[in-house]
Amino acid sequence: MIRRARYNEQAKITNKGENAMKNKRIGGRLLCLLLVLIMVLPAGCGTTGEQTPMGPTVTDASGAVLALKENRQELTIASVYAVSVPFIKALGLTDRVKAINCKSNFWKEADEHLKAAGSVGRGKVDLEALASFAPDVLVHRSNDTDTLEAVGQLGVTLLCISAEDMAGIYSTLELMGTYFGVEERAAEVIAWMDAKFARIDALVADIPEEDRKTALVMGGELGRIAGGDMLQSWMIEKAGGVCVAKGIENNSNWVTVGVEKVFSMNPEVIMCTSSTALEYELSDMLEGPAWSAVEAVKNKAVYQIPSLKDSWDMPGISPVLGTMWMVHTMYPEKLSKAELEKEIEEYYLFLFGKTFTPETLGYELSF
Amino acid sequence: MGRGNQKNRLLLLLTVNGVLLILLATVVVVAVCVGKYAVTPAECLKVIWGAVSHTPSGCAPMTENVVLMLRLPRILASVLVGACLSVSGVAYQGVFQNPLIAPDFLGVSSGACIGAAVAILLSLGRGSTQLMAFLGGIVAVAITVLIPIAIRNNTNIMLVLSGVVVGAAASSVLGFIKFTADPESQLAAITYWTMGDFSYIQMDDILSVLPMMGVAGVVLTLNSWWLDVLSMGENQARSLGANVTLLRNITIVCATLLTAGSVCLAGTISWVGLVIPHLSRMIVGPNNTRLIPVSALMGGLFMLVVDTLTRTIGAIEMPVSILTGLIGAPFYIYLLIRNKRAGA
């Protein structure tokens, strides 16, 4: 069939062949036109400017200046950014949540408002779902410019947060507290955290430099570690340890340095994160022949940071507990198991108004 | 007899295009009215009429935003991208006389992905991501075209091989970018880009590539007869007085611009440019004059149906390439079996 069609066309081609030269000239001009169009393409890109709001304002983590609304104590919330959940919970805002994406089911099981909330996507915002929930504010991370532009044009206010380190955690509490009209609660949470960190400082203050343990936090894969500028590394230092990843930085992200580099760092304690799924077992290190010369393995000091349901090394208020656990793990004489259990109970009473069993949270204290 | 055949063919062409147009219009109407945000057809009409006549629609501002700023740009973009990828597929398959060639075989998609991934890594924003994707696609195709020239073997087969090499190299570069990306945020954005996504499309995005796509599409349509000449093979085309090099270059430039424009709008969407030309060929035959408009309509229709499904069928919106792959791959296998039977 194809051959027959070509045969029929060939008859026409003979007659039209003489037009080839003419078409050649037209073709050349069209080629020039197309190149001009390529040059003008960037003119269509870009965003429009925004007006500075009047009255009291806050500046969010993206640098946007947001007006404080009169009904700020009633503003409803949506978010696909799981990091926002601990802050929303800590500030007592869960009853205003219309849609949320939680890191684990623990949050929904622990809070009936979060359980009843809908979803506007996971990581990426489903704009139509967002429109259908019609929240007043979408809480999102500040470095997702695509989403910020798309949501902005929909008419939903964006509040950007950045809580990748301890300074960011404090500023996020202040920002959300002010924007949602719960400044007092934000101040209460900050004061509580300050008091706990002050206690930790006091606990580890008298540990001599030479007795401080070297440690690192392992990520989801063996050889992928918390960079020196990550929250987990800050927690090690706060807990009186020496972070061997200091100087290895990747914009507050995990860094794949490889197993050999970990061997050369030779930490005395290895703590595996609970903020992401592990693609390995702790026994891979503890029983792996290749790891046998590493100090942490020799000392049997390889642990996973609690807890499996409510990660204590994830941005939020839980790094207080994570740091307490690190103190207990590295220096059990400074913070006993009973004292840590009391701290855990206090933490959940303060944030959730109730306590949870180790089984519910998914942790077991080693000693 | 010949005139009767021509009339029949013209009637078939008009009927096919007419049916496709009616189908496309119907799906557009359905697509405007369905979605996770409940909008009645009457509200849709009011909003669109209000926008056209510059009068208040009387609907809620969010309803107006959803219809005018989310759905209409998305529908327009999906039809445009589907049409462009399909026409681009027809053009490439014609020039290289190879029905297995997809629009991204010269490395345009791979290059565009690198450009977009770099922009995402640097958090440059959507406009810059699209621009970088476009430039990445063009640079990749330029390298693909320059390799045969550099080794003085400017044949079709060398160009195809060059495309394979550039595509493979680009995949490695993309892999490295993914490796360095933040897994919680940037990696997800890059993955979405490489799997095609219309969710954040804005009217400005479409308007920025529409003139280029329009001109490229018109040039290919006007040159469709010459595309038939090229389909016969280089020697035969030359014997008929065609400037093969110029025609081939024009076709490659236009088809590349259509693909690059599509990729910079919606990311990499697989199978459309490969399967739709085949499907169209089954209906109207291999003549490119007839094939291009039918492919454009069918591609636009297919893409719109797929995109409407991705944003409505699940609680979470999935990238379009998942569905195009699920539909395209089995269909292609069917085509291969059908061709084998026809050959036997």
Image (cartoon, coloured by chain):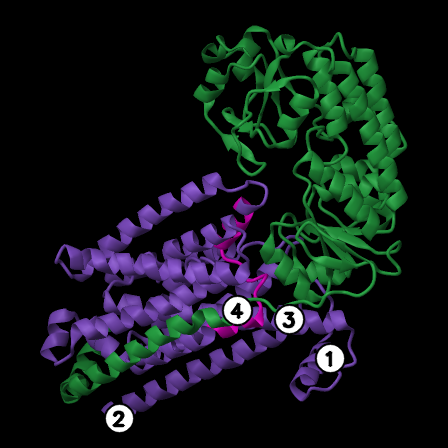
B12 versus B262 height, above or below: below
Q: Secondary structure at mark 2?
A: helix
Closest to the camera, between mark 4 and mark 1, is 4
Q: CA distance from mark 3 to mark 2?
A: 49 Å
B228 versus A120 height, above or below: below
Q: Position of residue A296 (x, y in %)?
A: 57, 11
Within-10-Å neighbours for mark 1: few <14, some 14–19, many 20+: few
Q: For mark 1, what is the residue?
A: B42
Q: Secondary structure at mark 1?
A: helix
Q: For mark 4, what is the residue?
A: B205
Q: Which residues are magenta?
A: B187-208
Q: Amino acid at mark 4?
A: Asp
Q: For mark 2, what is the residue?
A: B3
Q: Chain of mark 1?
A: B
Q: Amino acid at mark 3?
A: Met
- Drawing shade for chain B: purple
Kindly indicate whether the residues beneath marks 3 and 1 are on one polypeptide chain.
yes
Q: Earlier in the sequence, mark 3 or mark 1?
A: 1
- Drawing shade for chain A: green
Q: For mark 3, what is the residue?
A: B69
Kindly indicate whether the residues beneath marks 4 and 1 are on one polypeptide chain.
yes
Residue A259 lies in the magenta stretch: no
Q: CA distance from mark 4 to mark 3?
A: 12 Å
Location of the C terminus of chain B (image quadrant): bottom left
Q: Secondary structure at mark 3?
A: helix
Q: Secondary structure at mark 4?
A: helix
Q: Is residue B39 left or right of residue B2?
A: right
Q: Identify the residue at image location x=63%, y=62%.
A: A150
Closest to the camera, between mark 2 and mark 1, is 1
Q: CA distance from mark 3 to mark 1?
A: 18 Å
